[in-house]
Image (cartoon, helix red, strand yellow):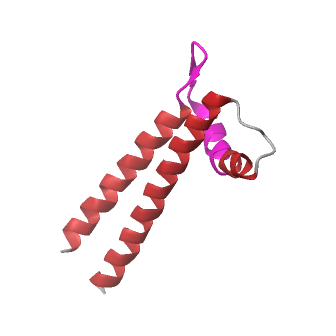
Amino acid sequence: MNALIVSILQFINLIIELYVWVVIIAALITWVQPNPYNPIVRFLYSVTEPIYAFIRRYIPTTFGGFDIAPIILILVLKFIQILINNIIISLY
């Protein structure tokens, strides 16, 4: 049973890591004024913007024209990864 739980937690950890890279790529793309009709840009926007909007609702994230919502999101995701890794370690 522990092996199944560990596998599920490792899969969730992998999904979180992939999403962190999506957030990083989306943040980097905003620096170059991408074509808003590009399917990749639309995908990145549709996957990250709802979470950014949620963060912006509770925390002011714009400082001097610089939006720190991606940084806050990455920190939260890394915190969740640390929790998952600690749970996996405790199951062994």
| 55 left or right of 50 in image | left
Where does residue 33 sit, x and y in percent of width and height?
70, 30
Furthest residue toward right: 37
Where does residue 44 sit, x and y in percent of width and height?
65, 48
Where does residue 7 sit, x and y in percent of width and height?
35, 77
| 45 left or right of 62 in image | right
Where does residue 5 sit, x and y in percent of width and height?
35, 78
Highlighted magenta segment, given as a residue range: 47-68
Q: Nearer the viewer, residue 44 or 55?
A: 44
Q: Nearer the viewer, residue 40 or 1?
A: 40
- In reply to whether residue 60 is colored magenta, the answer given is yes
As drawn, 21 above or below 32: below
Question: Residue at 58% across / 24% down in the picture?
Answer: 60
Question: Residue at 28% across / 61% down in the picture?
Answer: 85
Quarter-of-image position of residue 54: top right
Quarter-of-image position of residue 27: top right
Question: Residue at 61% across / 16% down in the picture?
Answer: 65
Question: Residue at 78% across / 40% down in the picture?
Answer: 36
Quarter-of-image position of residue 58: top right
| 85 left or right of 32 in image | left
As drawn, 67 above or below 19: above
